[in-house]
Image (tube, rainbow, N blue to C red):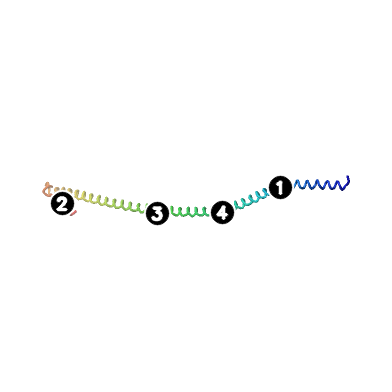
């Protein structure tokens, strides 16, 4: 064969190979490449969406954290105010109870003072009668002189 015939046969074989490759090999390769590019694009889109969601969630967390801090601060202030109020109420009750105890103690002291005066008057009256009896050297009848003794008690 001549070089031209060989060249023509090689050209025909090359064209058949190109046609076969374009018909049967190239479409699955391009489909696989297109699918791969689509998956990569979807992955990048999902990553961007996840970043946006993360940023939004971070903002929500910051807002919730600030709200929780404010709520905690308010609750703490309310608790402190309530504690101060309870302390003030307890002080007022203690002062009231102290005043009641003091008044009761004063009343009891007054009663004891009156009882002591009465007892002292009784003793003075008895001593006066005994003294008068000793001076007069005779017995004084207590029944007869009861009015006199009562007046003496009142004067003392």
| Left or right, 92 with reference to 68 | left
Real-space CA distance between mark 3 and mark 1, rounded to the nearest whole angstrom: 84 Å
Residue under label 2: 150
Mark toward the viewer: 4 or 2? 4
Query: Cβ–Cβ below 8 Å for labels 4 and 2?
Result: no
| Left or right, 52 with reference to 32 | left
Q: Helix or strand or loop: what does disc 3 sit on?
A: helix
Q: Classify mark 3: residues with Cα within 10 Å, few (<14), some (14-19) or many (20+).
A: few
Residue under label 3: 85
Real-space CA distance between mark 4 and mark 2, rounded to the nearest whole angstrom: 101 Å
Residue under label 4: 56
Q: Earlier in the sequence, mark 2 or mark 3?
A: 3
Q: Nearer the viewer, residue 10 or 48?
A: 10
Q: Helix or strand or loop: what does disc 2 sit on?
A: helix
Query: Cβ–Cβ below 8 Å for labels 4 and 3?
Result: no
Q: Classify mark 4: residues with Cα within 10 Å, few (<14), some (14-19) or many (20+).
A: few
């Amino acid at each position: 064969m001549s070089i031209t015939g060989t060249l023509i046969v090689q050209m025909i074989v090359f064209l058949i190979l190109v046609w076969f490759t374009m018909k049967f090999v190239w479409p699955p390769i391009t489909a696989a490449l297109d699918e791969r590019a689509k998956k990569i694009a979807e992955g990048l889109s999902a990553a961007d969406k996840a970043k946006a969601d993360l940023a939004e969630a971070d903002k929500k967390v910051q807002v919730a954290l600030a709200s929780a801090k404010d709520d905690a601060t308010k609750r703490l202030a309310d608790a402190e105010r309530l504690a101060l109020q309870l302390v003030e109420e307890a002080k007022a009750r203690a002062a009231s109870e102290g005043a009641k105890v003091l008044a009761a103690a004063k009343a009891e002291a007054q009663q004891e003072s009156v009882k002591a005066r009465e007892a002292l008057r009784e003793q003075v009256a008895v001593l006066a009668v005994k003294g008068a009896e000793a001076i007069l050297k005779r017995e004084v009848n207590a029944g007869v002189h009861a009015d006199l003794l009562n007046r003496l008690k009142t004067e003392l």
